[in-house]
Image (cartoon, helix red, strand yellow):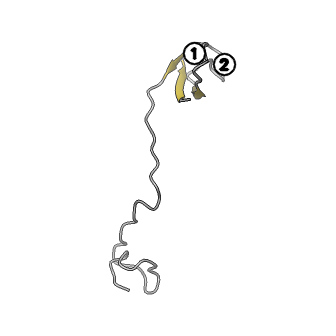
Amino acid sequence: MPIFEYRCQDCDTRFEKLVRNSDTDGPVCPSCGAPHVEKELSVFAAHANARAAAPAPMPGGCPAGMCRTPGMCGRDN
């Protein structure tokens, strides 16, 4: 079931709605109740695993004894 973004043409409220295949009626604005809504162009969102991207080395290096990952601060521990 996809989530679509809509904008009310009467009050300019933007909202999201979970759309089921069995839904035959169009969405109505949750703010003013108007049926005059249009589907907005949505951007696909992807989330990356936090472990997938390593942090960039710190410029100038880490303070002495503070580096937990050897090589990450530009200094060898």
Residue 29 quadrant: top right
Q: Secondary structure at mark 1?
A: loop
Q: Secondary structure at mark 2?
A: loop
Residue 65: x, y in percent? 46, 86
> Count the marks: how many?
2
Residue at 43%, 86% in the rendered image: 64
Tell me which numbered mark, 2 or 1, is placed earlier along the sequence.
1
User: Which amino acid is tagged 2?
Assistant: Cys
Residue 47: x, y in percent? 47, 48
Position of 22 with respect to 39 (left or right) is right
Tag 2 and tag 1, C-beta contact below 8 Å: yes
Residue at 44%, 27% in the rendered image: 41
Q: Which residue position holds label 2?
A: 32
Position of 21 with respect to 31 (left or right) is left
- The residue lying toward the viewer, choosing from 72 and 29, is 72
Residue 15: x, y in percent? 58, 28
Considering only vertical position in the picture, is 64 above or below 56?
Answer: below
Considering only vertical position in the picture, is 5 above or below 23?
Answer: below
Q: Which residue position holds label 1?
A: 10
Q: In what quadrant of the picture does the C terminus appear? A: bottom left
Position of 21 with respect to 41 (left or right) is right
User: Which amino acid is tagged 1?
Assistant: Asp
For the residues labelled 2 and 1, the Cα–Cα distance comes to 8 Å
Residue 26 quadrant: top right
Residue density around tag 1, few if under 14, some if 14–19, many if 20 or more, within 10 Å? few
